[in-house]
Image (spheres, rainbow, N blue to C red):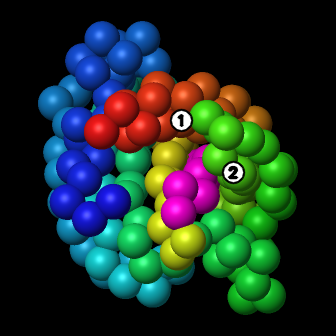
């Protein structure tokens, strides 16, 4: 997955179907959870929910990270495009949920769905449902490479 631009994994039509209308933004930063630099594409949806979708290409660790004892989250096993995955609902935070797909040894795609505002919070289960809708299209694009 070296060199994969996470912003290339959803078309404009797919982003619109998921409710995200902003221009995708690519960044790279060190993510302690994944123990390394991670390329992430973020996009926003319209108000009032102010939803955020983040797609990260992680090449430093696989989904086994979620089974380590220093991570506090509710994990729901899943399969996406034939690959093992988890819906990850963090215990400490209720403003996001993610789905992580194990794509190769020590590599994963992290799809994070978050948002809401103090005035209009989005229930975490709704965020998890959004996170679970996104990876199929992302994996289809990744496999096609």
Q: Residues within 10 Å of mark 2 (few under 14, many from 20)?
A: many
Find residue 135 and name its label: 1
Q: Nearer the viewer, residue 77 or 26?
A: 77
Q: Is residue 126 left or right of residue 38?
A: right
Find residue 67 and report its horizontal and vertical position in percent.
78, 76
Find residue 82 and report its horizontal and vertical position in percent.
67, 39
Total labels: the figure holds: 2
Quadrant assignment, res 123: top right
Instruction: Give the secondary structure at mark 2.
Output: strand
Q: Is residue 9 at all visible to an observer of this figure?
A: yes
- Residue drawn 30% across the image and 11% down it: 13
User: Where 68 falls versus 113 (above or below)?
Assistant: below
Find residue 49 and name its label: none
Quadrant assignment, res 30: bottom left
Q: Are marks 2 and 1 in contact (CB under 8 Å)?
A: yes
Find residue 134 and report its horizontal and vertical position in percent.
52, 30
Magenta-tinted stretch: 95-104
- Residue drawn 50% across the image and 47% down it: 111
Find residue 89 and report its horizontal and vertical position in percent.
73, 54
Q: Nearer the viewer, residue 50 or 53?
A: 53
Q: Residues within 10 Å of mark 1 (few under 14, many from 20)?
A: many
Label the magenta part by its dominant secondary structure.
strand
Q: Is residue 97 part of the magenta span, yes or no?
A: yes
Quadrant assignment, res 18: top left
- Residue drawn 23% across the image and 37% down it: 8
Q: Is residue 57 part of the magenta span, yes or no?
A: no
Find residue 85 and name its label: 2
Q: Earlier in the sequence, mark 2 or mark 1?
A: 2
Q: Which part of the image, by quadrant, shows the C terminus?
A: top left
User: Where 60 falls versus 23 (above or below)?
Assistant: below
User: Where 97 falls versus 66 (above or below)?
Assistant: above
In three-dimensional space, the C-alpha distance between marks 2 and 1, rounded to whole angstroms, equals 10 Å
């Amino acid at each position: 997955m070296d060199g994969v631009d996470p912003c290339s994994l959803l078309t404009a039509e797919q982003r619109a179907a998921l409710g995200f209308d902003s221009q995708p933004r690519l960044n790279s930063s060190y993510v302690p959870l994944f123990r390394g630099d991670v390329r992430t594409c973020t996009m926003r949806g319209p108000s009032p929910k102010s939803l955020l979708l983040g797609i990260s290409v992680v090449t430093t660790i696989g989904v086994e990270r979620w089974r380590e004892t220093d991570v506090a989250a509710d994990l729901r096993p899943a399969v996406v495009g034939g690959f093992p995955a988890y819906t990850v609902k963090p215990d400490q935070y209720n403003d996001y949920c993610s789905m992580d797909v194990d794509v190769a040894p020590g590599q994963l795609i992290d799809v994070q769905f978050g948002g809401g505002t103090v005035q209009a919070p989005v229930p975490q289960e709704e965020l998890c449902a959004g996170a679970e809708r996104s990876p199929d299209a992302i994996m289809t694009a990744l496999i096609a490479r």
